[in-house]
Image (cartoon, rainbow, N blue to C red):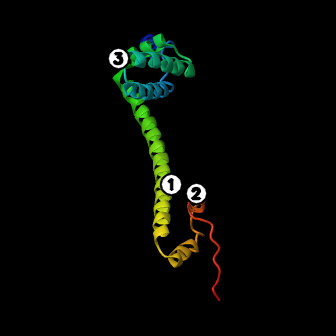
Amino acid sequence: MRNFLYILSLFLLISACKPGIPKDIIQPDKMPGVLSDIHVVDGYISNLPGVDSAKKVASAYYKGIYKKYNVDSAMFARSMTYYNANPKLLDEIYTHVIQDLSRQKAVITKSDSVINAKNRIELMLKLSADSLARKSPDYKIRFLLKDTTNLTDTTKKAMEFIQPKMVYKNPN
């Protein structure tokens, strides 16, 4: 019985001393957001001309990130040192960072493609309206009287802007 108590107390001692993430370290659920924002800022700053202006801009952005997540630069440095010493945790964190940055990239790509599609439609309408100016009046009238029920609101507005207001009179 005595040996059982010694083994039980040793087991509890070992399990109680299990190291966790210290309180002065940014927790793993918060760290991907901090790193995502920092990597976005790093990408922006790397495209700025001039090293001095980039440093000035960078410090303001980093302070904003630290304020957003309620951390400071010393806590971030300690956290990065801790996570670099624990590569499995850092790998899990960067998996979330990559997912977040990929999601942001997809949103930006989608919005860019929508804007480009609208611009392409407006340009095509303008080019077709310009070519109509060189065509016969009958062709212009047929184009203006086309069915526009399936067009989007943006395209209809573009057509209204591009097309002159014409009144078609029946010759009969």
Q: Is residue 29 left or right of residue 47?
A: right
Q: Position of residue 85 (x, y in %)?
A: 35, 17
Residue type beneath disc 1: Lys
Q: Which mark is residue 118?
A: 1
Q: Position of residue 64 (x, y in %)?
A: 53, 20
Q: Residue 154 carries which label?
A: 2
| Residue drawn at x 59%, y 59% as measured from the top left | 161
**Quarter assignment of residue 6:** top left
Q: Which of marks 3 and 2 is in front?
A: 2
| SS at badge 3 | helix
Residue type beneath disc 3: Ala
Q: Where is residue 77 in the image (x, y as percent from the top left)?
A: 42, 13
Q: Residue furthest bottom?
A: 172
| Residue drawn at x 46%, y 69% as measured from the top left | 134
- Real-space Cα separation, disc 1 to disc 2, in angstroms: 7 Å
Of pointers 3 and 2, the one earlier in the residue sequence: 3
Of pointers 1 and 3, the one earlier in the residue sequence: 3
- Choose between 45 and 17: the one closer to the eye: 45
- Is residue 136 visible to the viewer in this orientation of the structure? yes
| Residue drawn at x 63%, y 66% as measured from the top left | 165
- Is residue 11 visible to the viewer in this orientation of the structure? no
- Real-space Cα separation, disc 1 to disc 3, in angstroms: 50 Å
Residue position marked by numbered label 3 in the rendering: 85
- Real-space Cα separation, disc 3 to disc 2, in angstroms: 54 Å
| SS at badge 2 | helix
| SS at badge 1 | helix
Q: Residue 26 carries which label?
A: none
- Choose between 159 and 47: the one closer to the eye: 159
Q: Position of residue 29 (x, y in %)?
A: 50, 27
Q: Using a 10 Å C-alpha cutoff, classify the residue at mark 1 as few (fewer than 14 neighbours), some (14 to 19) or many (20 or more).
A: some
Q: Nearer the viewer, mark 1 or mark 3?
A: 1
Q: Are marks 1 and 2 in contact (CB under 8 Å)?
A: yes
